[in-house]
Amino acid sequence: MHATTTEPYALVKGTGISDVWFYGGARISVKIEGSHTAGRLYQAHLVEQRGSGPPLHIHHNADETFYVVGGEMSIVVGDERIEAGPGDFVFGPQGIPHAYVARSAQAEFFVTFAPASMDRFFEELGGIPVVPGQPAPAASYPDPEEFARAVAGWGVEIAGPPLA
């Protein structure tokens, strides 16, 4: 489902309009893209493994929210480190450096971007399609300089290493 639509739709648990494995072993299930909302909203469900998370980065084109469904995470926004668990919500304003790391065996959460600046981001930057019944591929990480150049096209600036 990548067509532009303004029609309501529903997705069953465990599915998305796009399901990919991303660097570090994250499973990302895109629930809605900007093409469905005239560019207003993007949301994805992520499951990260212990110790995984993105480098410290800045979104120059969107605000980002995190809603933790399961597990434990450390989320840094600006100078603040938030220890988050199920039911916790964190807001990362546009222009503020932020990152997260999964502290439990798995961390399950939703990320939302407004406006929808991340359409096709995970798919185009190395996401491997999820095949039901097949295990996750081995975790791998891109060259940091190449990754920084690639994410710049989505208005993202790498500002530091991943959290420990």
Image: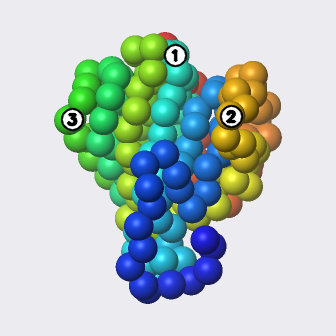
Check the picture and name the quadrant holding the N terminus.
bottom right
- What residue lies at 20% left-to-right and 35% top-to-bottom? 87
Vertical comparison of 38 with 72: above or below: below
Position of residue 23 measured from the top left corner of the image (x, y, whole percent): 68, 33
Compute the Cα span from label 2 to label 1: 24 Å
Q: Which residue is mark 2?
A: 133
- Amino acid type for the residue under numbered disc 1: Gly
Vertical comparison of 103 with 24: above or below: above
Q: Which residue is mark 1?
A: 51
> Would residue 94 be visible to someone looking at this image?
no
Vertical comparison of 149 with 142: above or below: below
Q: Earlier in the sequence, mark 1 or mark 3?
A: 1
Compute the Cα span from label 3 to label 2: 31 Å
Element on which disc 1 rests: loop
Name the one closer to the observer, 114 or 156. 114
Answer few, some or many: residues within 10 Å of disc 1's Cα (few below 14, many 20 plus, some between 14 and 19). Answer: some
Most extreme residue toward the front, as rendered?
A: 133
Name the one closer to the observer, 119 or 18. 18
Q: Which residue is mark 3?
A: 88
Image quadrant of residue 138? top right
Tell me how many marks there are: 3
